[in-house]
Image (spheres, rainbow, N blue to C red):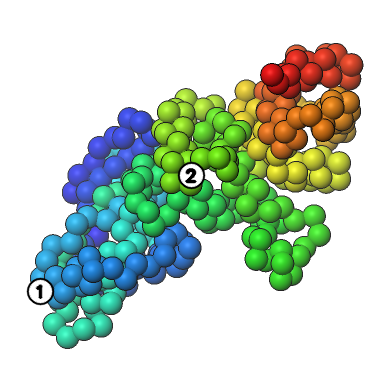
């Protein structure tokens, strides 16, 4: 792959470039990458892609695809970028172009296909997974093939090495077929990731039609300047893994609404939290639960306020560590007053 341009994306602080190769190289080295994100988008059998297939055979120039990488390697110039891309092609992610690649593969099976035809790529290298996902959502915004929730869930599965972190994560399907005791739900972790990216714990609302809610979620992600975050979501997952040896902490964090609030609050209190051992963390979480259970739970939206109060508690943990249960309950009471 010939990389012939380099620039900086000031929003995500990433390196970008333009690259050229041919259909043959693309099918051999880049098309297999769609298997990494096989749930990324349903393959569409539309008139557009049937027409594109015919156009490929007729020698059209396909619109550029987007290939991305997560790396902290120092890349200062065009030569460095070219070496990195060609050495790490198997570790890339297709951020934009799944449908075009599958169409290209179908066309390659037909008579008249030219493997030497040139094809162009936009290259993006981000230094963390949050920024890569942010850019993916902006690229796919407005397309109906995959919702923001779906993008986040499947990339959560692909981008985070849970085995290395020594925590077990299962999809809903895996849990139903072969449940593993004390495993985390991928869907719940993805909800926490969504909360982290939007800085908002209320990202689901049955009163709002799905399409409109998707627009709201994209807006929240774009409005939340993740480039200013002191941490990335990987730090949240690492913290969770650190405390899974404590059964109380693990059970509390495995509760979806707790984890959603925790994922947002962690950004503000990560330095303090990382100084706590599991016993101290358990003590603070027990205080949260004791205060929460004193509330008149029959008169509040339990899930909503558990998300909001866990966010409040974790986000301002330095202050609330000095409170006793009665004082914390008073705070929770004030925050849950509804007209």
Residue at (68% x, 53% y) in the render: 185
Q: Secondary structure at mark 2?
A: loop
- Mark 2 or 1, nearer chain start: 1
Q: Quadrant of the C terminus?
A: top right
Can you tell which mark lies on residue 58? 1
Q: Nearer the viewer, mark 2 or mark 1?
A: 2
Q: Circle 1 sits in a helix, a strand or a loop, which is it?
A: loop
Counting every numbered tag in the picture gives: 2
Residue 30's tag is: none
Task: Please give left or right for residue 74 compared with residue 160 in the image.
Answer: left
On screen, residue 144 versus residue 282, left or right, reads left
* Residue 75 appearing in the image: no
Residue 105 screen position, x and y as percent: 29, 74
Q: Residue at x 86, y 45 (%)?
A: 247
* Image: 303 above or below 151: above
> Does residue 134 sit above or below 308 in this rendering?
below
């Amino acid at each position: 792959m010939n990389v012939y341009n380099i620039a900086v994306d000031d929003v995500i602080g990433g390196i970008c470039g333009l690259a050229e190769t041919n259909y043959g190289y693309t099918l051999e080295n880049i098309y297999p990458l769609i298997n990494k994100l096989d749930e990324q988008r349903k393959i569409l059998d539309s008139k557009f892609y049937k027409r594109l297939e015919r156009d490929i055979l007729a020698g059209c120039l396909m619109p550029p695809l987007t290939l991305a990488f997560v790396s902290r390697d120092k890349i200062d110039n065009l030569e460095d970028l070219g070496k990195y891309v060609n050495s790490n092609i198997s570790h890339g992610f297709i951020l934009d172009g799944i449908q075009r690649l599958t169409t290209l593969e179908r066309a390659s099976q037909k008579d008249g296909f030219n493997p030497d035809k040139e094809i162009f790529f936009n290259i993006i290298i981000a230094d963390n997974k949050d920024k890569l996902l942010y850019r993916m959502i902006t690229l796919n915004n407005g397309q109906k093939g995959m919702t923001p929730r779906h993008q986040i869930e499947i990339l959560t599965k692909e981008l985070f090495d849970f085995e290395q972190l020594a925590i077990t994560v299962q999809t809903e399907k895996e849990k139903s077929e072969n449940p593993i005791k004390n495993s985390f739900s991928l869907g719940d972790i993805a909800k926490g990731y969504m909360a982290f990216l939007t800085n908002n714990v209320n990202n689901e609302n049955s009163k709002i039609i799905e399409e409109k809610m998707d627009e709201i979620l994209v807006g929240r992600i774009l409005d939340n300047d993740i480039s200013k975050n002191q941490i990335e979501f990987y730090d949240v997952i690492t913290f969770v893994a650190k405390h899974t040896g404590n059964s109380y902490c693990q059970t509390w964090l495995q509760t979806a609404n707790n984890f959603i609030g925790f994922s947002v609050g962690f950004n503000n209190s990560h330095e303090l939290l990382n100084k706590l051992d599991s016993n101290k963390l358990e003590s603070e979480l027990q205080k949260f639960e004791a205060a929460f259970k004193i509330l008149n739970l029959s008169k509040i939206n339990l899930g909503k306020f558990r998300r909001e109060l866990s966010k409040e508690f974790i986000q301002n943990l330095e202050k609330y560590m000095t409170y006793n249960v009665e004082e914390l309950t008073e705070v929770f009471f004030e925050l849950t007053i509804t007209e």
